[in-house]
Image (tube, helix red, strand yellow):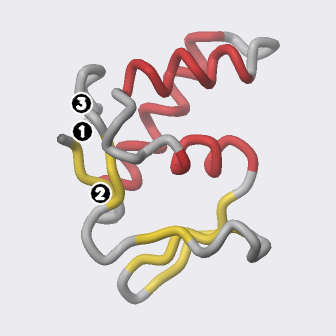
Amino acid sequence: MTPEQHRKPRLAPGCRMNDKSQQPRVLLMPEKALRLNGPSLEIVERCDGKHTVQQIIVQLQKLYSKGDPQKVEDDILGYLALLHEQRALDFE
């Protein structure tokens, strides 16, 4: 499943990030946890139901401007799809 660019990802019910003061940052999901850092943390922090997939891609292409823009986009779409498959994300 490739996320549609106009959709707004948000954490699924039962999923949440640990507190910002706690390190490492962790995405808490029913029956598992996923440690986040670097790009994965940047992606999940933007999955707030307010940013579209396209907005997240543009923001991270700017943040990682030394990388190939198409590779950055592909990586983001792949990660969002993975989180959706793991039932950590929903799309509005």
* Residue 80 against residue 75 in the figure, above or below: below
Give percent across and percent down for residue 35: 65, 69
Instruction: Say which quarter of the image contains residue 83.
Output: bottom left
Mark 1: few, some, or many residues within 10 Å (few <14, many ≥20)? few
Instruction: Say which quarter of the image contains residue 71.
Output: top right
Mark positioned earlier in the residue sequence (1 or 2):
1
For mark 2, give the secondary structure.
helix
* Residue 17 against residue 92 in the figure, above or below: below
Mark 3: few, some, or many residues within 10 Å (few <14, many ≥20)? some
Q: Residue at x 75, y 72 (%)?
A: 21
In space, the residues marked 1 and 2 are separated at their CA atoms by 8 Å
Give percent across and percent down for residue 75: 55, 32
Instruction: Say which quarter of the image contains residue 66.
Output: top right
Give percent across and percent down for residue 81: 35, 44
Q: Residue at x 34, y 36 (%)?
A: 50
Q: Residue at x 75, y 13 (%)?
A: 65
In space, the residues marked 2 and 3 are separated at their CA atoms by 16 Å
Mark positioned earlier in the residue sequence (2 or 3):
3
Q: Which label number is shown at residue 63?
A: none
The amino acid pointed to by label 2 is Glu
The amino acid pointed to by label 3 is Arg
Residue marked by disc 3: 7
For mark 3, give the secondary structure.
loop
**Residues at discs 1 and 2 in contact (Cβ within 8 Å):** yes
Residue marked by disc 1: 1
The C terminus is located in which quarter?
A: top left
**Residues at discs 2 and 3 in contact (Cβ within 8 Å):** no
Is residue 57 toward the left or the right of residue 29 in the image?
A: right
Residue marked by disc 2: 85
**Residues at discs 3 and 1 in contact (Cβ within 8 Å):** no
